[in-house]
Structures are given as structure tokens and as C-alpha cells.
Amino acid sequence: MVQELLKTTERHELDYIFRPRSIAVIGASHKRGKIGREIIRNLLEYGFNGQVFPINPNVSQVNSIKCYAKVTDVPDPIDLAIIIIPRDQVWEAIDDCHKKNIKGLLILTAGFKEVGGKGIDYEKKLKDMLEVYGMRMVGPNCMGIINTEDDIRLHATFAGDKPLPGNIGFISQSGALGAAILSLARSINLGFSMFASIGNKTNVSSNDLLEYLENDERTKAILLYLEDFGNPRNFTQIARRLSQKKPIVAVKAGRTLAGARAASSHTGSMTDLDIASDALFEQCGVLRAASIDELFDLAQAFTSQPAAKGDRVCIMSNAGGPAIMATDALINLGLRMAQLSPKVTEYLKSFLPAEASIKNPIDMIAGAAEKEFALVLKAILEDENVDAVIAINVPPIMQNPIAIASAIAEVAKQYDKPVLGCFMGVEDIIRELQRKEVTSIPLYQFPESPARALAGMVKYHKLITKDKGKIIYYEANKDTAEKIINETIEKKEQLLPPAKAEQLLTSYGIPFAPSFLVHTLEDCIFKAREIGYPVVLKAISATLTHKTDWGGVIVDIRNDAELIDAYQLMNKKIASMKDYQFEGILVQKLIKGGKEIVIGMSQDKNFGPLLMVGLGGIYVETIKDVAFRIHPITEVDAIEMIQSLKGYPLLKGVRGEAPSNVAFLAEVLQRFSQMINDFNFIKEVDINPFILTSEKETSRAIDARIIV
Amino acid sequence: MVQELLKTTERHELDYIFRPRSIAVIGASHKRGKIGREIIRNLLEYGFNGQVFPINPNVSQVNSIKCYAKVTDVPDPIDLAIIIIPRDQVWEAIDDCHKKNIKGLLILTAGFKEVGGKGIDYEKKLKDMLEVYGMRMVGPNCMGIINTEDDIRLHATFAGDKPLPGNIGFISQSGALGAAILSLARSINLGFSMFASIGNKTNVSSNDLLEYLENDERTKAILLYLEDFGNPRNFTQIARRLSQKKPIVAVKAGRTLAGARAASSHTGSMTDLDIASDALFEQCGVLRAASIDELFDLAQAFTSQPAAKGDRVCIMSNAGGPAIMATDALINLGLRMAQLSPKVTEYLKSFLPAEASIKNPIDMIAGAAEKEFALVLKAILEDENVDAVIAINVPPIMQNPIAIASAIAEVAKQYDKPVLGCFMGVEDIIRELQRKEVTSIPLYQFPESPARALAGMVKYHKLITKDKGKIIYYEANKDTAEKIINETIEKKEQLLPPAKAEQLLTSYGIPFAPSFLVHTLEDCIFKAREIGYPVVLKAISATLTHKTDWGGVIVDIRNDAELIDAYQLMNKKIASMKDYQFEGILVQKLIKGGKEIVIGMSQDKNFGPLLMVGLGGIYVETIKDVAFRIHPITEVDAIEMIQSLKGYPLLKGVRGEAPSNVAFLAEVLQRFSQMINDFNFIKEVDINPFILTSEKETSRAIDARIIV
């Protein structure tokens, strides 16, 4: 019926690939072990609901199906061509497909950009060719695609496993890993709606597929294996929208290799690609799994269980040890142990043996049978203090784990709360249960797995229900800022002089400690008196940065006498640094008290401007207590950035200190984001430190390095 | 033969339990599903190499073996009695065993201290009874013991699985978890030398068993599942010695629950039990696994592979994605990617296809067959820049993974370097390979597992080969210290007054900033001039601590004028704190520059004195950058404590600062440890801050809270 419908309704351009009515396999082979033959075998055995046309000039039939020499010889219309011939023959085949008016391609052939050298040219040629012909193509260098839809049954890969139908959409950037994942999923009864190995993503990107899966009703959750984001800005936009509708769980490989991308300033050197990835995932509502293992834990929970609307978990078990381990895992993951209501504990006491522990984690002891599992589960699911349940069973001798699993599943399905199981030491039985679909709840092997899955579910629920905030526009003196930046660019300078940096920031309402550049002692004293003691002296040089390293900063100068000494000392220091040019000495108001904050921005080639905030001074470099967001940020983003710092409690005030004005810091971050947004000529900013006090009026930037 | 030998040689007291010649099963049953019957069945089916005597007054035979009414009716001598009767009948049975001169007991019966209430009394009774009778007993409330030794074949549990012989000794404090682990181990072909579920540890403790396994030649590695340490000081002593001979890997449950044990001072509140556990494991050379899963990953590697003598790992793979994931995992775990020697890369280039990547991680691409796996592995194992190898195989269509596994194992066994495998998507085949012992290298399912196992192996090798250091005795004025402590105790005071605290620390060579307690402004000015400006004023009260919270500290007073203002301000403050008693105002030398360090000690009920060092000030409370050790410490411990701080780079000096005198801090820690060692009346110490500068002479404690 779907096939019929497809003929009459307008088709999405990717429907020609994922929902084809007819397929040509260019490079069909009649030999065992050849990919062309394996694909045809999979198409037939999986019951493709359409026509398959093998194409191979040297063979008359493949798998008893008539074989054509060229795709143009096929008398019927064709939606999808699967290309498996050597690279140098691909061009002619694509030409033929175009002549035959084929709109969808799946190219498994390798030898393009992934081999480097000439391959990069071939990749470019392929890309251009497809654009000119207006064709859509998955691949090249991929292992194929799957659509388990009843009326389609497309298994166009050479993987040996037959995927189960289900509601997971899977996009893999690695063919080999994709095949392994299909096999692992099969062994735990995890079903897919669609699967795509996307190879080099020359034409159809992971972003295209995300949008395609967004509108696929059968897909309830999306799993991604990524090695790069393609176009991260597109990814952000699509994933932000899509994650509101369906959970997206991603494994992103390459988290450490990217560390080499060291940038010039301190701020920049910390924004390696992986931090950017984390920021991007966080902002888009995408859950990041650390391993394939964890990806599977989450997938099983998301596709079988209702949403986790809160983080209060109750653990029930027939054994103490695994219950303790699950508790440890839960707490470490930031979840809470539910406090059972007195009514429920009283009730549990009424039928559990005296040796049982009726507090959470509930230990029903080894004798617990189906009846106890069912009664306890029912009681805790009824408790409004419980948001989710982990049911642990370590089957003792002569227990029937299948009966226990069924009893748990039977109760669980009557409630709108997630129930995850952990059955230890009976792996073979678990697999069997899953294969036979005896249980509708996920059964894990180790107590850490359900804890991890629940943490993901709780995080997802928070992400989609939280207030996202909005981007606020503050009043700013854009004209002044524009003038400063243009002047600097016209002079072909990169680093803004201190006075200009100060002007730029203040024009966007980011306060700066009063300062003057002076060249004589007299002027210095005069200016110091004007701004008022105590003051700070700083040697200013465009060529010599990190002035504290060589004594180019003298702080806490309290009167004229101390200033004279300091000024002379500073001049001696400057004289000793013969290799550098100095523009003068900056005399600046000393801001007393407050916390040192670092605010920064660096342009990432892929992600665009990355904003950073951190706890300041030398700590920022050693402890690296910083938070990143991809630009632009909302007021909620700003507050979350600050709250995510390890040292955030310091800002709230400890030991009787007045709390720092966090609301103002959030405003400064948003103003900063707005400035970055208005001027894409700004390449890098490092406000270090920004002194945050309890008062908006006394909080000020002290030093800023701005590169345009 | 062993049985014969045992008759002639002197037997260890635990041999009667783990290497018995004859066993009485008290509570033998002829009914299916009853524990007594299952144990006899296991004993028989596993081929126990001795005699089994069922004891049950109501039955004439069990499993065709003659049954006696009482153990005293058995005509033959008996080594071990297994007791499975209800708790209230246990006493008479033990009496009978004593009459029969049985030396070993295994009590599975539950209902002792684990049920609380009266159970605690029964536990005490049992303990005393066994001591009086001089019997050794494993249990109660346990699931049994196993010894796979050929000449013993003791399977005295009611677990359904038949454990394989091997070289892992396993001690489990949870019976249920023990059974689950036996089953999991069986499924991946992991064999045991001995296994013991130790239950309530009323008589035979985990420490007793560790010592027993220490001398068991078949046991090459020891796995522990612990919920508590029993006697942690014993554990420390035994584990320190034993870990030098055999790796010990432990899972310790209850890492978060213990957090509730909040102590009175800030220092104390951070030393919750789990931090103490980590410190104890670290100091004893015990590897801590975060989960059962990780325990297994490590066990497979330790029991099959040679030691990892370095941390330079080479990854070889036939697929890119999993190789990247393994790389990520390795780097995150602190291992290094080996830099292959040019000779080796040249050689690899000579036979691998052009598309292959010959840099580490080596990607041989999907076509790699047995030959390529073997040649590449041989080449990298020959490379002296490589300490260990992870071989990843994601079998493409028509590859024979069994042949690949055999080829890898064949090469690996010719070298003295660990080789760990990861075969993805072929779980069933892996299990089959392991069952058939086709491969002698561990094969994992996910790339993170071999990385984790290697990290454990590298850590273990470092632990056993590193210089442990020794405990140094510094010259100290013990008499003065003793006098101070005795005076305080005699006065029935707990908190040492500041002057006494200063004296106590200086008597052990821990320098203290000069200070005087003053009561008049005149005296204050006089003393300030004596120690020299700048100075600090502090309000001293035994009842009101955390003086910075309410303004009881004024710093950086530079001259008489400032001092007069400060003194008067302080007196006003004191007058306003009516509810507290003050002993006066302390005038103290201001130590300029330097880093704030916190040094602390708290007495742990189980572990004894726990020493702490951390980066100071308010950071210590929020970022919790602290390190712990169990007392006493060697010079290596002291340095390691300091180096393990996240903020350690700050101490080495950043941004042109002079490095802090870390060697002196290490000396202070050791002097501190020595002081704690000399006076076990000292209950708690909190030196906060200790100012560490680049010079020994200017580094000083500023404030110390000492409770006796």
C-alpha cells in the first residue's frame, strides 16, 4: 500500500534512495563472496518489496534474475542505482544512470577522498557531477542502507545480519562499525527503523539524513556515530529542533586527537575541538555517549520505556551487593535515591521477610519470587516520590528468571514511569528472553548499565522541558565600536591597543577599570590622583605579552611615594627588555576584592565563535575550570555556563563573603556575545581578568586582548 | 598425589576447609531444589577427590550415598563440615563437629548479624564458640567455596555453573554477586584457582584468605569484591606485600553511601570513607575497578598476558572508527600512542595497500587477512618503541575471524609484550573461540575494554617496580611536644590554644609565622614592631572558629597608624560578638607571596590517621583539590601526594613565578606524619593555611587547629 501511495503522492528526494520501487545493482556478481552478489542476496532474502535489476555485461543472470549489460538496457523505470564497480568505471555508470533518469544513487565503491592524493580530485569530480545532474547519492565508500518498513524491506548492505524492525534510526560514519553495530543490535533484539552508512558524505550528509529521520514516524530515537560534524552550524540548527521531538544519542570519535590544534593565546589553546563538540552537543540537546556500549544502554531504554520525568530512582533487588553498586553508579551520575513514602514502606514491611531491607535500595533477599517482585514493583511505582525504578535480579538456585522478567514487565507496562532491569549471571537467558520478546523492559547484565541509561533519560527530559531562554539585545554604541575596529583594520594592525580595547568593550556596556597611558612620571602621578589610589602600573607593549611573567605589572600602589618608586622600577624593567617596543605605562585603578573571571572568544574554523568563561588568574590554566558555548547565547545559556564551573560555589560566596553578582556576569557574557555577533572581524578576545564583585558598579574588566 | 602429600606434610589450618580429604554435609537433603542436595550434587559432579558423608536424621541416603543421623556417627575422620541447617540447630551441630574433632567449617546458614537485632547476639555467640573450640569457619550467610585444583576438585557451592580451572583467586563478600560472577566467568572461559564467598566473615576474614592465596602457587591474580575492609590496617599490611607478587584487582561497593559520615572540621568532612578507600588501595598497590565489567576486563589481561613494562601502545586495526575510539580511550586513561620507528613504517608500507594508514593507529583497511594481521603484529612487536599492542578486527563479509584470532595469538606468544584483541560484531564467535581456547589472547567486544585493561596493567607494573621510599625520622623536640599535649589533656581541654599549637608544630620542625597574643593596644604595637611590619591581626576564641567569616582577621597592616585603626576596629568586632569568649588578639607576621597549602589529619575509625594535603584557601573547599594517604608516609608517598594535586603545576611555578619549594613541603608532610605517629592522642589537625614560598626559610604555617 505504501508503494501504491508513493506513486500518487509527491516523493521526498531521499525517498528514491530509502523507499525505492525498483533498484539496479550496477556491478552485480554471480560469485560467492563478491559484494554485488551479497547485496542482491540480502535484497531478496530480506524480501524487498519492489523490483531488482542486476547490471553486469559479463553475466546473463544473478540469483536467477535476468542480468542487463547496462542500466539503460532495463525497460522499466528505476528509482535507485547501487554502484559497486571499480572507481574508474563509476563515471560512465553515473552518466548512464542520468540517461535513465535515475534520481537516487548508493555508491559503495571506495578510492575517493579517504585515500588522499588523486582521490581528493575524484571526490570533487563526483560531487560536481551529481550537482549538475541533480541526483542524490549516499556514499561513496560506505557499506549501504537499510529500511525495515514493512512495505519496503530494503536491506541494501553486504552485512551478514538481518536487522529487526524497530524504532531506532541509525546513522554511522564508519562502515565497519556500522556492520558491527547491526550485529550487536541483533543479538540483543534491538530493532531499527532505518540505517545508513554514510561514507564520505559527498552528497547526502548526516544533516540531510537527520532531517529525513525527523519526519519519519517510525523513528522514535536516533543514534549517531560521528567522526566529524560536516557543517556544524547546520548540525546545530537541525539537532536543536529535532532533539525536541526525538532523543538523539551520539558517539563522537576523535576526542583526544584534536588536542593538537593549539591556538596562539591561552584562551584559544583550551578550546580544542572536543570541548567545542561537547558544547555543541549540550546546546543542541544531543546526548553524548562515551562508548558504543553506552550507546546501546541508552538506546534500549529510550525505545522501550516512557520518559523519565524526574531523577528520584528506587532500586529493588534480591541481592545486596549489586544494589549497592547500582546506588553508587546512580549517585555518581547525579541522580537521587527516592525517599519512599511511609505508607509504602509500611506496606512492604507487611509481606517482605524480616531479613529484607525495606529502605531504598530495597533488598527483598534471595527468596523473592515472581509474587514479591510484582508486589514490590507495583507499590513503588504507585509512590509519587518515585520517578523511575531499577529492578535487579541475581537468580538464586532453582529460580525461574523468565517468570520474574515477565512479572516485572507485566507490572511495568501499567505505569508511565521507566523500569529498567538488571539480571546478573544469566546472560544466555537474557539474550533468549530478548530474542523471544518475552520482556518489554530492557534487561542489562551489570548494575551500572541501567543507572547510566536512566541518567541519559533524565538528562534528555530536562533538556527538552527546560526554558531555553532567548537572545536579548542590549543597548550598545555600535557606531563607536565600528569606528574602532575599522581604524584598526585600516592601519593593518591586528592587536587593539589597550585604550581601544577598553573603548570597544565599554561601548557594549562591559565596564573597564579606569586607566590612562602615561609617558612621564609627572603625568603618571597626575593621572593616579585623578583616578584615586590604590593604583596599578602596567608596561604596555604590542610585541611582549604576558607581562606578569617578567614583572611588567606592579600592583597595590597606595600613595605618591610608592608610585614614584614603582614608576622608576618599571622604567628600569622596560629598559632591560631591549628586544621589545613599548608604548608607555598604563596607570589603572586597583579593583579591590572580587573574583577573577576570564572571558574569552576564539573563532573555530568549523563551529564559528566559541565563547568561554572561567574562573580566573593562574587557576584557569592549571585547573582549567572553564565553560564553553557556541555563539550566540541566550540568557539561560549564560547562567548555565557560569553554574557549570567547578568553582561556582566560590561565586555564591563562601565563609561569610558577599556573593558575587552572577546576574551581572551573565549580562556581561550576553553583551559580549552581542558584540561578537555584530562584528565578525573580531577574531579573538581574552578579557583576563574581569573582576566580579558583589556590586555591578565595582565589577570591571582589568585587561583585554582583542585581535581583529 | 596432593591428597597423599597432605597426609604426611603439615597442613595449613585453612587446608581443612579448602583442601579437605573428607566432607560431612550437615543438612543433606534428597529433595531437588534443596541446597543440601545441590551441594552434594556439585561435589559429586565436579569430581571431589575425597569422601562425602551426608548427614540427616530423616533420610537413609542422598544421591545413593549412605546418610548418617549425626556427624558423630560417621566412622571415618572428617576434615570439613558444611552446615546448611536452620540457625537454631547450628549450635548443636557445631558441638558435634567439635566432638568429632573436625577442624574446618563452612556455614551457609543465614540469620546472624546481617538480619540485625537478635542476629547480632547469635553472631557473637558463634564467634566465641569457634574461638573456644579452635575451629576455623568460612561464613555464615555465604554461598560456598571452590578449589579447582586437579587433586582436590572441591565445588562446595549451590551455584549452577561448573567453574573452569585457572589462575584467578576470587574472594567475594556478596554471595549473590559471587554466583553471578562464576556464571559470567564461565561464559568467557575465565578460570579460577579458588573461589570463596565469605559471608559475614565471622571467623575466616578476607585478610586470612589473602594470606592463604599469597602462598597458593596456582593463583596468579586475585580479584576481590568488597563491601568493607574488615580490619583495614591488616588489609594494608597484607595487600602491600601481596600486591608485589600478584596483581590484586578490587571492586569496592558503597562508594557514595558512606559520604554521610560528615566530621566536624572542614578537613574532616572531606575524608569520607571512599576517599580513604582510594588512598588505601593506592598505597597498597591494589587496582580498583569501577565495575564488575572492568574487573573482568583486567582479569582476562592479567591472567593471559605478560607484564606491560611501559605505556607506549600501538593500535592495529582493519577499520578506522574503532581504532579512533581505542585511541581516545587510551589517551584519556593516560597511556601514550607509540611512535613507530621509521624502519617499521617503511616495512609496513612495503606490503600494506596504498589506502592503508601506516601511522599509529595502523589502519590496514577491511581487506586485511591473516597474513597482514600476522606481519603487522610481528613488525610492531619487534619495534622497541612499542610496549603493548591492541589488535582490532571488525570482520568484513567472508572473513574468517577464527583464522585471524589464531594468527594474532600465534605471533603474540613469541613476544614478551601484552597483546589484547578487540573483535567487534562477532560476539558469538568470540565466546566460541574462548570456550574452545583457540586463542590465548583476550578478545574484547568494545575498543574501550582493551584500553582499560592495558591501563590497569601499566599501572600495576609501575606500582610494583617503583621505589616505595622509606619512612624518614627527623630530629624533633618530642619532650616539648609531650609536655604541651599532656598539659592540654590534664586541663581537660580539647582545642590547643594558638600559642601551644605553634609550639607543638615548631617542636617538630614545622615552621610557624611569628605571632604574639596581646591584650592591649600598646602591647600590640610593641609586638608588631618586634616582628616587623606588615602584620596581621586575628581575634582568638576557642568557641568561635572560622574567623574570616565574620571579619575576625585583618591583613596587610603596614605601619603603626594602620595598626591602631585595625586594632580598634577588631575590638569593636569582638564586642559585637557577645555570645563568644575571646582570649585576646593575635598579632602575626604577614607572609608575602607564596601559595596557600592546607595540611590536615583526621582519625578514621577504621583506617587510623588519614593525612591530607591540598591547595589552600577557599579553593580547597569548593574544588576539593586534595590528596590523602594513610599514615605513616614515606618520602615517596609525600612527593606523590603533592604531585597528584590538580593544581600541582601552580607549585612548579607558572608565568615566570619562582617555583614553590615542593621538597620542603614534602619534608613538612613527613615531619607532620612523624608527629602524628608519636602522639596518638592527637585527634585532628587542620593547618590552614601553610604558606609555601620558593624558600624554605620563608615558608610558614599561619594558622593551626589542633584537637587532642
Image: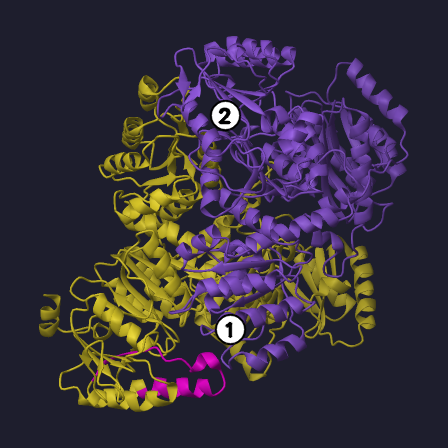
Chain colours: A yellow, B purple
Above or below, comparing residue B175 to residue A104 in the picture = above
Q: N-terminal of the two: label 2 or label 1?
A: 2
In the rendered structure, find residue A246 and report the number of the disc placed on it. none
Position of B85 relative to A422 (above/below): above
Q: Position of residue A56 (x, y in %)?
A: 26, 86
Judged left or right of residue B665, residue B242 is left
**Chain on which label 1 sits:** B
Count of numbered labels shown in the rendering: 2
In the displayed structure, does residue B170 sit left or right of residue B285? Answer: left
Camera-side residue of A179 and B673: A179
The image position of residue B284, as x and y in percent, is 69, 39
The residues colored magenta run A102-129
- Residue A439, compared with residue B254, is above or below; it is below
Q: Is residue B54 visible?
A: yes
Q: Identity of the amino acid at label 2? A: Cys
| Secondary-structure class at tag 2 | loop
Q: Residues within 10 Å of mark 2 (few under 14, many from 20)?
A: many
Q: For this rendering, which residue is in front, A515 or B257? A: B257
Q: Which residue is mark 1?
A: B364
Judging depth in this view, the residue of A9 and B108 nearest the camera is B108
Is A118 included in the stretch rendered in magenta? yes
Write the residue at 38% across / 73% down: A199
**Residue B142: which numbered mark, if any?**
2
Say which amino acid is labelled 1: Met
In the rendered image, the vertical position of residue A444 relative to residue B264, given as above or below: below
Who's the residue at 81% across and 48% down the image? Answer: B663
Q: Is residue B128 left or right of residue A282?
A: right
Task: Choose top left, top right, bottom left or bottom right for residue B499.
Answer: top right
